[in-house]
Image (cartoon, rainbow, N blue to C red):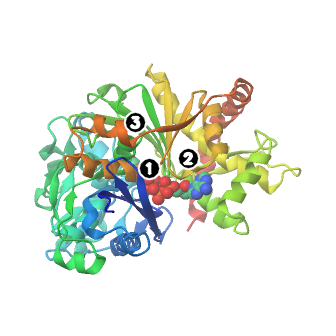
Amino acid sequence: MTTKCVLGVDLGTSAVKVSAVTRAGTILAQQSFDYPLNQPQPGYSEQNPNDWVMSTTVAIVRLILDDQIRPEDIEGISYSGQMHGLVLLDKQYQVLRPAILWNDTRTTKQCAEIDQLLGDQFVKITGNRPLEGFTLPKLMWVKENEPEIWKQAELFLTPKDYVRYRMTGTLGIDYSDATGTTLLDLHTNQWSDVICDACGIPKRILPPLVPSGEKVGTITAQYAEFSGLSQQTVVFAGGADNACGALGAGILTPNKVLSSIGTSGVILKYEAQPNDEYQGQVQLEDHVIPNAYYSMGVTLAAGYSLSWYHRTFCEDQSFDEMIETAAQAPKGAHGLLFTPYIVGERAPYADANIRGSFIGVDARQQRADFTRAVIEGITFSFRDLLNIYRSQQSDFDTVVAIGGGAKSDFWLQLQADIFNTPVTKLANEQGPGLGAAMLAAVGLGWFPDFQACAEVFVTTQRVYQPNPLNVAKYDELYQSYQAIYPATKDVSRALQRFQA
Ligand SMILES: Nc1ncnc2c1ncn2[C@@H]1O[C@H](COP(=O)(O)OP(=O)(O)O)[C@@H](O)[C@H]1O
Ligand SMILES: O=C(CO)[C@@H](O)[C@H](O)COP(=O)(O)O
């Protein structure tokens, strides 16, 4: 029996995950493959774009060979990608340098320049404040620091657009990733002449714009031979991972908020209009859904803090065992708090120089207390993001959790207790990969629109209710957590010169 399916390619920061999804929303199979993240200097974060292509290909080959997904049954493919990363290409569309990623903070100087050049006008045009992670300051950094490479630059792409280019031979960027460059005028959906002129970015290096759900081509003969895919498979543009994550979690109305614990951490809200009340306090981006937007606050190192902690202190335990021991430790980890600022922070503190801390270290504490403090600290940083919305009197009654962090029941209950809001776990949680698959499913005409697709693809498995006793305890701990950023700001700065 043949089962028609679509592939959702989720190009994350830790790995690529490719899911094969049927018309009924069933996940037939999923394959993933990791790639390294390189930090050649403090504050730098880079990946090799070729690693993304190779890993995506391995995942697809495994779906075909190990999971027996027949290439002729794969009707469509679409993508979700880590946002903001700069892939710089020369005239032959060869990669000129390693990709500079969203969590790279080398561009503080360029952000200050943008602020000086454009001030509030930048926020009005893009919906965002200039922050180190965005693509525009990265372009300015290359122009200033690597003039030889800049001279050869013909075009830039964001990560998933580069992978799509290698599979189809067509160049372009979708609107959700284009807003994440902060070169797009959010109100006209055109590249902004004002920003390009002020910041010295030639318009010729900007890629063509394309809607996320649009068909951009088919698989090239060369890539079909390389991967085993059929040349008949239709390819749709795809979108930013957080936009796809929101779609795949059914965040289609403003009463629902997304909590995504991937490498980064994200609290995201659907916006029917480009809400200018945020004034850059949170990011504002085009959605993958036409004529819709979303806002989000981002913690730079959410899952990354836990992966760092695991790699550095608990390599003798599996990830699941490590989390299990944390669940046995008491709430508040015997008086230990952790702040997850290990690569700097983006929201609510836009501060590339802040660094993380353990506060309250006591001779009675065990390793499990430290693990618990890391998980609690990451979750407190999400509460900081939720507070931005709460302070705007934003109405929401449900948090839907996705990402690596949503795999654990313990962490899901902890989110409900720390947020004091019900937290929903999805059945078939594939994170942004499901949103990518939905772009292909709607693009192929399997469904009339995203709402109809979400009704079939997105189902709730369980809702975690906040426990009032735990809520009270975490409220108290959170007061102390909030005091850590102002108290450690100057200390972090003073320690900076020892980082190299
Ligand atoms: N079993 C688990 N339980 C809880 N968290 C996990 C588990 N496995 C991985 N994680 C966390 O999930 C993160 C990766 O999430 P993922 O959504 O795959 O990230 P990305 O899209 O950035 O590659 C890791 O950094 C890790 O901290
Ligand atoms: O920079 C942002 C959003 O602005 C990050 O959320 C990236 O999009 C990376 O996402 P993950 O790899 O953590 O999913």
Q: Residue furthest front?
A: 1
* Residue 36 x %, y %: 47, 71
Residue to which mark 1 is pinned: 431
Q: Which element carries disc 1, helix, strand or loop?
A: loop
Pointer 2 residue Cβ closer than 8 Å to ligand 1:
yes
Q: Earlier in the sequence, mark 1 or mark 2?
A: 2
Residue to which mark 2 is pinned: 406
Res 488 visible: no
**Nearest to the observer: residue 207 or residue 228:** 228
In the image, 472: left or right of 257? right
In the image, 260: left or right of 63? right
Distance Cα–Cα, label 1 vs label 3: 21 Å
Instruction: Please report the residue visible at 48 percent of the width from the left and 48 percent of the height from the top.
Output: 429
* Residue 488 x %, y %: 63, 45
Pointer 1 residue Cβ closer than 8 Å to ligand 1:
yes
- In the picture, the disc for residue 282 is 3
**Nearest to the observer: residue 211 or residue 498:** 211
Q: Quadrant of residue 322?
A: bottom right
Residue 2 to residue 271: above or below: below
Q: Are marks 1 and 2 in contact (CB under 8 Å)?
A: yes
Say what amino acid the circle numbered 3 marks. Val
Q: Crowding at label 2, few (<14), some or many (≥20) Cα neighbours within 10 Å?
A: many
Foreground tag (1 vs 3): 1
Residue 425 to residue 81: above or below: above
Q: Which element carries disc 2, helix, strand or loop?
A: helix
Q: Are marks 2 and 3 in contact (CB under 8 Å)?
A: no
